[in-house]
Image (tube, rainbow, N blue to C red):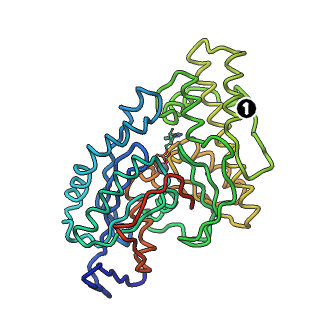
Amino acid sequence: MPDVQVLTRDRDEVRMNSHKPIYILGIESSCDETSCAVIDSSFNVYSNIVASQVEIHSRYGGVVPEIASRNHILKIYPIVEEALTKAAIHLSDIDAIAVTNGPGLMGSLLVGLVFACGISYASKKNIIGVNHLEGHLSAIRLSKDILKPPFIGMVVSGGHTNIYEVANWGSYRQIGTTLDDAAGEAFDKVARVLNLGYPGGPEIERCARLGDEDSIPFPIVMPDRVDISFSGLKTFVIDFIKKNPIKSETDRNNLAASFQKAVARTLFEKAEIASKMTGMKRILFSGGVAFNNYIREYFEKRSREEGIEVFFPEKRFCTDNAAMIAASAVRRLENNSFDDPLTLSANPSAEL
Ligand code: KG4
Ligand code: ZN
């Protein structure tokens, strides 16, 4: 990485050619995880604390926005303190603060953003607003930049299923997206139909391990397009259960396994179409759904057969976390491109 100049507002302090690491404090609160991380600009992770609210929201079968933001308020201060303590780095040694400012739930985003802007203003530290989707893509940088642009980047999470042409870090062109449900959302909804808990992804993966993935031939919706539809697959599952009520654990496991395979196949076929469209042979699969071992293995096997290379962030950086947000900010640090803590705002529907 080139030498980084860090300009501290007001003090115009420039740190060039320094051998001391450049430390970034990342803050993420866009949905139901409150997270804070300390990394350096060479992508060493010193701490990455994630406080999940999953137990609270599982009672309601999904994230309740008002409850999420109230819990972020309770957690944000202790989580930031814990991240600094675990990293053994004092706030005064932090060079820049990276915070998610969209997309996400407005109330949730605001808690992290206002907290980060407050620290930035009070301590005269640089602040960088980060797009959460770029965060998911940048998670791979935490594996010491094993994958460098250009490549195809897939963000497959609870809120998004997007395919990007990544020409460079900071240069993203969306070439495909879901026309309805995100992949993670489809996992969550199908899990509900199967009377499994929230979030649905891990529950379906658990049941699927015991089932036969070829027992029910679910269709691939819109097979010739790079865009995706999961709502059709979800409807197919619901109709199938109406006609063939679940009578045993085996029925449920078979359904989970067949559905999971259909999602993996759908996503891989979209990746293949994107590869043909762009001529790019390297694919990054990121986001919460990349936590799924079956999908990781499916992609690895199919990509070997098709002459494509697939990359996944480490599993701990796939679901929402602040280390990926801090990693996104490195490109901005390299260009001395900072935001103003008095005007940086949240955008719940921000695009990349
Ligand atoms: O990236 P993420 O933590 O949050 C968003 O940005 O949405 O993704 C959460 C989503 C949830 O829908 C969850 O069901 C899904 O990721 N997920 C999984 C697995 N673990 C989490 N989906 C499939 N298999 C998993 N093991
Ligand atoms: Zn996410």
The percent position of residue 15, horizontal first and vertical second, equals 29, 85
In this rendering, would 304 be left or right of 221?
left
In this rendering, would 120 be left or right of 104?
left
Q: Disc 1 designates what residue?
A: 218
Tag 1's secondary structure?
loop
- In front here: 99 or 148? 99
* 249 relative to 340, above or below: above
* 222 relative to 311, above or below: above
The percent position of residue 151, horizontal first and vertical second, equals 62, 66
- In front here: 265 or 14? 14
The residue sitting at the front extreme is 343
Residue at (40, 65) in percent of width and height? 344
The residue sitting at the top extreme is 247
Q: Locate residue 159: give its quadrant.
A: top right
Residue at (22, 69) in percent of width and height? 123
- In front here: 301 or 59? 59
Q: Locate residue 251: give its quadrant.
A: top right
The residue sitting at the right extreme is 224
The percent position of residue 339, horizontal first and vertical second, equals 40, 71
Count of numbered marks: 1
Q: Label 1 amino acid?
A: Phe
* 316 relative to 165, above or below: above
Residue at (71, 51) in percent of width and height? 270
- In front here: 117 or 75? 117
Mark 1 Cα shell of 10 Å, populated few (<14), some (14-19), many (≥20): some
Which image quarter holds the N terminus? bottom left
